[in-house]
Image (cartoon, rainbow, N blue to C red):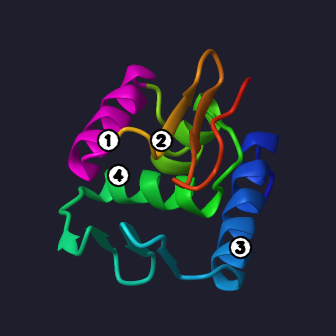
Amino acid sequence: KPFSLRELEARIQALLRRVEGAAGSSVYDDGVLYVDHKNFLVKVAGEEVKLTRKEFALLSLLVQSRGRTLTRDYLLDRIWGLQYYGDSRTLDVHIRNLRRKLGRSDYIETVIGIGYRFRPPDSEPSTE
């Protein structure tokens, strides 16, 4: 059946997400932050942190793409979907909540005018 190019792109992205998820590691652990992608579990310094589904999806995507800058549009499309027409400030609120719940703001770096990047504690700050 005919469909738009935007829908085709969404289907391809969904397929790529499934393939990436199967190939990547299901656990991130740097000694302080522990993220188990398959069991939806987050711990900071051994204490479990309760996250909403969107917060967990956002953290998981950032962790799996660590070191790479993810644009605001990319994050909105991946977490909220192509059909989301709300305010892009929703992303900022979720990032702020994530930083507060993690107890550290240095994990999630803001790349002004572009988006966000997950920066493990042993990596150097970006000069971009």
**Do the CB atoms of the residues marked 1 and 2 lie less than 8 Å apart?**
yes
Q: Looking at the image, which residue is at 31% across and 69% down?
A: 42
Front residue (pair 100, 121) = 121
Identify the residue position indicated by label 2 in the image. 108
Q: Which mark is residue 43?
A: none
Identify the residue position indicated by label 4 in the image. 54
Q: Residues within 10 Å of mark 1 (few under 14, many from 20)?
A: some
61 sits to left or right of 37? right
SS under mark 2: strand
SS under mark 4: helix
Identify the residue position indicated by label 1 in the image. 99
Identify the residue position indicated by label 3 in the image. 20
**Sequence-wise, which precedes: disc 1 or disc 2?**
1
Q: Nearer the viewer, mark 3 or mark 1?
A: 1
Q: Which secondary structure is most common in the magenta stretch?
A: helix
Q: Residues within 10 Å of mark 2 (few under 14, many from 20)?
A: many
**Which residue type carries mark 4?**
Lys
Q: Is residue 4 visible?
A: yes
Q: Looking at the image, which residue is at 51% across and 53% down?
A: 121
Q: Is residue 87 visible?
A: no
Front residue (pair 44, 116) = 44
